[in-house]
């Protein structure tokens, strides 16, 4: 794939501006803060796409939080997986037993990874386990998982930016945009 | 700058240097106390501490060695692999739902969704073929909803399949897996070779949901 030096040239439409994202993150942070008032919270983020959202959200939550990061293999990487099964590539660095845990996701579409993650984390006996996502793409859902906090419900388009990638690029865009189909079809 | 101020400044600088030297010496002493002493040249004595293994095999049992069914279409085979990867239990066309009977009560049309996902209580029907067949499947699905309102069937169109392949960095395979060309089913090894050739799998993806 070829990423243009001016990455914005590969973006067909800006779906969410930097300002819209910031306002929504602040709103989610307040809501989560109210729901977890007088409690401590562990935010668990999944590398790599959730990093910008996690960094902003944790600062918008007014209750004490600790953070942890996980990395999970995806289907695209199966040729390097001997078992052909999803695996935890990076586990939690601290126990979550008895803790209030909030999974922080950048986007939920099929729900396949999240379904696996939820089952894995439940096995670690947290006191509670909730889910927060910046973006929800319900049209793509295969596994229905109740999501507690949703930033934006977006249409069925391939989006990049604010952590979301295509071929590992575009994560550093400050907005969420729709990638031009020519970029991934190679046509045009 | 007067001589007095210059002396004062030098004195402060010397005190800072002395404090820094003391701190470095204290740190080195503390670290030395923590690290087991290893005789010079005796590198074999260094113990490499591995992180504890990740036990994520909580539902591996029986998933890997079962025989795969004879899929009718390559997109179905790919979906089976995706479901396996994400440890979603599935069965291939296990149930058939009658949707049309003649006047004698004999079933003349039925519908067998491609996948049954028992843990999710969901049927998946892959519809990646020609538009004419999509219309036919849409009609069947409407009948299913009328006759069996409690069952959940998700129709997976060619565009859904494309989006899934795009998400997993396997766009180069799409045209071979959908439509009439998808009726020749490549085996797993061929698919993986194709992905590598397409240069789309260089960085094994980290997950998105």
Image: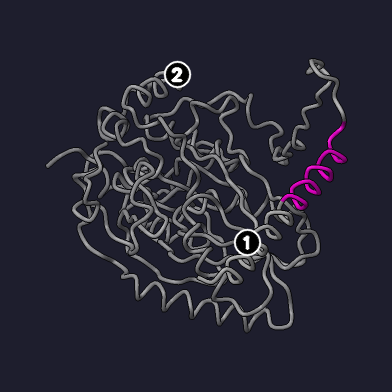
Magenta run includes residue A72: no
Q: Main secondary structure of the magenta part?
A: helix
Q: Which of marks 1 and 2 is in front?
A: 1
Location of residue B179 with respect to A119 vertically, above or below = above
- Write down the chain letter for disc 1: B
Q: Quadrant of residue B144?
A: bottom left
Instruction: Please provide percent x and percent y for residue A64.
Output: 69, 74
Q: Camera-side residue: B176 or B126? A: B176
- Write down the chain letter for disc 2: B
Mark 1 neighbour density, 10 Å: few (under 14) some (14–19) many (20 or more): few
Q: Camera-side residue: A19 or A5? A: A5
**Residue to which mark 1 is pinned:** B10
Counting labels gives 2
Looking at the rendered structure, whether the residues under marks 1 and 2 are on a common chain is answered as: yes
- Going 58% across and 57% down the picture, which residue do you hit? A45
Magenta run includes residue B33: yes
Mark 1 lies on a secondary structure that is helix
For marks 1 and 2, give the CA distance: 73 Å
Instruction: Please provide percent x and percent y for residue B78.
Output: 43, 33
Q: In which quadrant of the rendered image does the N terminus of chain A lie?
A: top left
- Going 53% across and 52% down the picture, which residue do you hit? B122
**Residue to which mark 2 is pinned:** B189
Stretch of the chain drawn in magenta: B21-36
- Going 84% across and 36% down the picture, which residue do you hit? B35
Location of residue A47 with respect to B128 vertically, above or below = below
Mark 2 neighbour density, 10 Å: few (under 14) some (14–19) many (20 or more): few
Image-based side of A166 in relation to B42, left or right: left
Sequence order check, earlier mark of 1 and 2: 1
Instruction: Please provide percent x and percent y for residue B83.
Output: 52, 40
Mark 2 lies on a secondary structure that is helix
Q: Camera-side residue: B27 or A42? A: B27
Q: In which quadrant of the rendered image does the C terminus of chain A lie?
A: top left
């Amino acid at each position: 794939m070829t990423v243009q030096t001016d990455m914005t040239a590969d973006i067909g439409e800006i779906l969410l501006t930097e300002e819209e994202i910031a306002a929504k993150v602040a709103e989610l942070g307040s809501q989560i803060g109210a729901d977890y008032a007088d409690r401590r919270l562990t935010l668990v983020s999944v590398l790599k796409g959730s990093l910008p959202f996690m960094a902003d959200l944790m600062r918008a939550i007014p209750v004490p939080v600790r953070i942890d990061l996980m990395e999970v293999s995806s289907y695209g990487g199966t040729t390097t997986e001997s078992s052909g099964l999803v695996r935890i590539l990076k586990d939690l660095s601290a126990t979550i037993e008895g803790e209030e845990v909030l999974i922080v996701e950048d986007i939920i579409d099929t729900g396949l990874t999240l379904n696996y993650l939820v089952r894995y984390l439940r096995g670690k006996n947290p006191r509670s386990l909730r889910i927060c996502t910046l973006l929800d793409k319900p049209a793509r859902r295969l596994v229905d998982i109740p999501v507690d906090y949703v930033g934006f419900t977006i249409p069925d388009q391939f989006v990049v930016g604010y952590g979301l990638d295509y071929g590992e690029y575009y994560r550093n865009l400050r907005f969420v945009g729709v990638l031009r189909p020519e970029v991934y079809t190679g046509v045009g | 700058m007067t001589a007095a101020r210059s002396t004062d400044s030098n004195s402060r600088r010397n005190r800072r240097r002395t404090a820094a030297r003391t701190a470095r010496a204290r740190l080195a002493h503390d670290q030395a106390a923590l690290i087991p002493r290893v005789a010079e040249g005796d590198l074999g004595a260094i113990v490499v501490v591995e992180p504890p293994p990740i036990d994520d095999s909580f539902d591996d049992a029986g998933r890997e060695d079962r025989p795969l069914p004879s899929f009718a279409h390559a997109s179905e085979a790919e979906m089976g692999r995706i479901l396996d990867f994400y440890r979603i239990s599935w069965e291939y066309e296990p149930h058939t739902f009658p949707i049309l009977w003649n006047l004698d009560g004999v079933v003349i049309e039925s519908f067998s969704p491609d996948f049954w996902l028992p843990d999710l209580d969901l049927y998946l029907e892959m519809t990646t073929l020609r538009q004419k067949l999509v219309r036919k499947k849409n009609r069947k699905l409407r009948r299913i909803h009328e006759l069996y309102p409690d069952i959940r069937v998700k129709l997976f169109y060619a565009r859904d399949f494309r989006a899934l392949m795009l998400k997993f960095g396997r766009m180069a395979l799409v045209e071979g897996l959908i439509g009439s060309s998808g009726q020749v089913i490549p085996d797993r090894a061929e698919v993986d070779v194709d992905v590598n050739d397409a240069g789309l799998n260089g960085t094994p993806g980290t997950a998105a949901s």
